[in-house]
Amino acid sequence: MLNDRFSYSTTVFISSLPYAATTTDLLTHFSYIGPVRHGFIATDKESGKSKGVGYVTYSLKEDADRAVTELDGGEFGGKGRKIRVTWADKRVHYSCIELQKYFELMKIACTWRDC
């Protein structure tokens, strides 16, 4: 049997986020769809500035499906900014600890919830 890392994805990738958006803003916005396991906004490790992208992982695949369908092209932050919501890269799914190590290596800072 394949390792669980190769299972279906429940993670969505969000781009065109306002640079002032926080991880809390992201999680609050996406939690209206369903329970969120974790998520973060990627920031530059040296400057701490947002890269305008983030990831959200849902508990259920159905909620991730809804997020892609219902939130893609929708507004974020109340200023008319439209975000893009797509499936995260469907390669191997990593644990939070593995992702943190990768981001440290790539000099990308992130904040985590429930990891």
Image: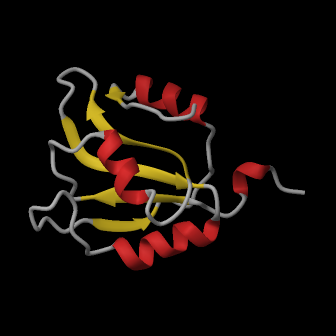
Q: Which residue is at 50% across, 28% downward?
A: 100
Q: Which residue is at 9% across, 62% downward?
A: 79
Q: How far across and how far down the image is residue 31, in percent?
A: 45, 57
Q: Which residue is most to the left?
A: 79
Q: How far across and how far down the image is residue 88, in percent?
A: 47, 59
Name which quarter of the figure residue 15 lies in.
Answer: bottom left
Quadrant containing the C terminus is top right
Horizontal side of 86 relative to 115 (left or right) equals left
Quadrant containing the N terminus is bottom right
Q: How far across and how far down the image is residue 52, in percent?
A: 22, 48
Q: Which residue is most to the bottom?
A: 69
Q: Which residue is at 34% across, 28% downward?
A: 109
Q: Which residue is most to the top?
A: 46
Q: How far across and how far down the image is residue 66, in percent?
A: 49, 75
Count of marks overlaid on the render: 0
Horizontal side of 108 relative to 91 (left or right) equals left
**Closest to the observer, 101 or 60:** 60
- In the depicted structure, whether residue 80 falls above or below residue 54: below
- In the depicted structure, whether residue 24 falls above or below residue 48: below
Q: Which residue is most to the right?
A: 1
Name which quarter of the figure residue 49 lies in.
Answer: top left
Q: Which residue is at 42% across, 23% downward?
A: 104
- In the depicted structure, whether residue 34 falls above or below residue 42: below
The colour scheme used to paint the residues is secondary structure
- In the depicted structure, whether residue 44 falls above or below residue 59: above
